[in-house]
Each structure stands twice: as C-alpha cells, then as structure tokens.
Image: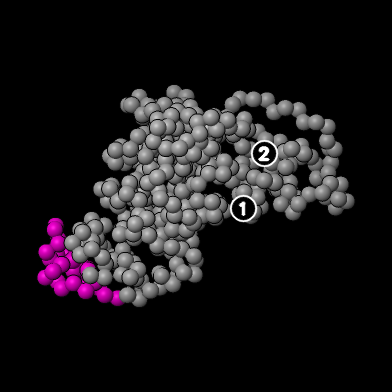
Amino acid sequence: MLKYWVWLSELKGLRNQTKLALLRRFGDPESIFYADPDELMLTEGADPGQLKLLENHDLAPADKILADCQRLDIQLLTFSDAAYPGRLKNIYDPPALLYYKGKLPLLDDLLSVAVVGTRDCTPYGVACAEKLGFGLASGGAVVVSGLAKGIDAAATRGALRAGGFPIGVVGNGLDVHYPYESRYLYEDVASAGLLLSEYPPGTEPASGHFPVRNRILSGLSLAALVVEAPEKSGALITAATALEQGRDVFAVPGPIDAPTSVGCNRLIRDGAGLVTDAFDILREYEGRFTLDLKEAREEPETLGYQARTVPEPKPVAPALSLSRGDVELTDDQIAILKALSDTEPMQVDDLTELVDIPTRRVLSALTVLEIDQYVVQHAGKHYTRAVTLTE
C-alpha cells in the first residue's frame, strides 16, 4: 500500500541507501514495517542505529501526506512501479518514492536532455537557453530542468513555446512554488509535461535539497547541457553528477572575459561537447530516437540572441486611449500595456509576476501586441511599450 511507501520515505534520519537496502531484501515497505528486528538485522550493510528508526510505526503523517496528494491532484511513483524509469533506477542513489503532476510516459523511450545554468544569468544566457530549449523540443527531445530562475526557466519556456513535453524536477513540494515568480511555469509544465519531486506536499525549499535534486535531473536524462555557469555554480555540480552517471555533457561557449561563462568554457576545454544550436546535440542521438533535425534548426529569429537593431515600427498613434476604446484589446493585453514602461525594457518573467497572469497568456498577448506594434521586443526577450496610454 502507498501509505507504507510514504512511511518509509519520510522516516526522519533514515538514509536513502538504507531504504534501498531494505527494499532489496524485503521487496516492499509493508514487509519492512511488519518485519521482526532480527529479520531487519539480516539486511546487507545494516546499521543498528538506522534500523532503530524503523521502530517508529506512526502512520498518521503518511495518511496526511496521502490526503494532501489527493486534494492537490499529486500522484505517487514508487521504486517498484513498472513506470519507474530504468535510467533513474540504475544510478547510485535513486529516490525510493517520487511525487508527480502531469503525464507519465515511458521516460526511457525519450531523448531527455537536462538543461541547467546559473540563476544570475545574462541576456545572452537567457536567449541561448530559450533558443536551445525551443530547438531541442522542436527536434523531438525532452527538456529537463530544475525550473529555477534564469537559465532553467528560459529553457523550459522555449520548450513550451515549441509545444514540447518539458520535465521539471524541483527541490520542494509540488504545491510550493520556488522561486515564487515561477508559479505559472509550474502550472504550465504540469499541464504540458511532467512535474517531479521526491519531497511531499508542503515541503519548503532548503539549500540541501538542490544538490540532492540534481542527481534526479541528470539521472532522468541521457545528456546534460550547461548554458551559462560561473566558476562556482550548482549547474557544474549537475554536470559532475552527470559524468559520474555516465551521461554525456555539453556546454555553450561564452566570452572568455565573462564571469558567467567561466564554467562552460572550462567544461568545453575538458572535453564537453560544444553547442551552438540544438542540432549539435540531436545529431548525436539521431540513430537511436525518432528526431526531426530539420525542425530543430528552423527556430524563430526572435528566439536567437544576436546584436540587432529593432526595426522601425510602422506608423502608429503616439497616444492610445483605453477609456475611449480606440482599439479592441483583451483584459490581458490591457494589463500588460499598463505594466510595461515605454523607456525601460522589462523581461517576461518580471512582467508575468507583475501582472499576475500565467506565462502562456502573457506570451500570447505580447505576440499580438508586437504584431500590432503596441510593444517593441528587444534582445533577450525584453519588452517596452511603443505607445503612450491615456485615460
């Protein structure tokens, strides 16, 4: 029963390796729950201090977690389920239990690529991540990320725009949005793809969760792509974990004097595959998966980062009256126009948080507003308002 899986997973102080050793011997948590102490001691590598924790037979916390999961539409995936991916099962320290929202395909049949990078990224990194996320998804690959602010979020947005199946692996409960500005991204990923965590509902993020989470990111994937990473970055931990797990590692080059590219440039120097577009990764796996390399290279120009001059807009009224109804605008479009500045470019993530509208609706509204020349897009997916609003 699931409550015994939750009981075993949530026993405070019980190491994951102990859980896995017990599962290898007894087969399932219910048998562990009812096993005699002498039987437990026969577990390979048994630590008496660890086994003493199994004396806690309080199932009330497990019942509460299961009730929360039902209320929040969160499913559970156990180590013994047929759908548990073999790639993840075969790493050194696989999670015994995962919580998920969304669709659960046969993950071993997919070309999954973990896309990671720094939170404190540059416009160059954001544009590269979104371009590569779009290209990978367009070509038939699955983008896996931690949904963190910066590179992770940009790659996921790119995959969503391509109509892909993104996977997000988070270091907190699935009902806890971290960072808060990614709350709509959580919803979009759960709707279009798969949201995963080894932590039960209500678990707040903690610094120790994220390095542990990284083993799942790389464990689900065949390759890890580092887009932008300074000398000391969690993305480099993911890359190192990927190498330990026998995964391929790729990196995006950057300027030699850019602090945010030091980690990527060193990875390339040490043998990581150099990536300038999604094709560089997809061609490595073309014979093993059904991919579309042509689609991967046909990315919209607006997703690529390049030095360009914003074209002169066609003539538009310098002032736009919302009260007189000069034009027909949706509520989303009006809210976005009011939030945008006509001088200071604003990034999509910041705009989404400000207007409190889901990312997919913000992107849709921005596209229409840009076509109608009411907003101007700048490098790095930043926007300004191109008209003056009057009441």
- Say which mark, if any, is on residue 210: none
Is 255 left or right of 360, judged from the image as shown?
left
Residue 234 at x, y = what percent? 38, 42
Task: Say which element carries label 1.
Answer: loop
CA distance for labels 2 and 1: 17 Å
Vertical relation: 112 (above or below) 252: below
Residue 242 at x, y = what percent? 33, 40
Confirm whether the magenta stretch covers residue 40. yes
Q: Residue at x 40, y 48 (%)?
A: 107
Of the residues shown, which amino acid type is indicated by label 2? Tyr
Residue named by callout 1: 358
**In the depicted view, which residue is nearer to us: 310 or 188?**
188
Of the residues shown, which amino acid type is indicated by label 1? Pro
Residue named by callout 2: 383
Where does the magenta region start and end?
32-58
Quadrant hosting residue 272? top left
Q: Residue at x 33, y 26 (%)?
A: 271
Of pointers 2 and 1, the one earlier in the residue sequence: 1
Is 160 left or right of 115, judged from the image as shown?
right
Q: Residue at x 40, y 73 (%)?
A: 64
Vertical relation: 7 (above or below) 223: below
Quadrant hosting residue 253? top left
Q: Residue at x 50, y 46 (%)?
A: 165
Q: Nearer the viewer, mark 2 or mark 1?
A: 1
Confirm whether the magenta stretch covers residue 97. no
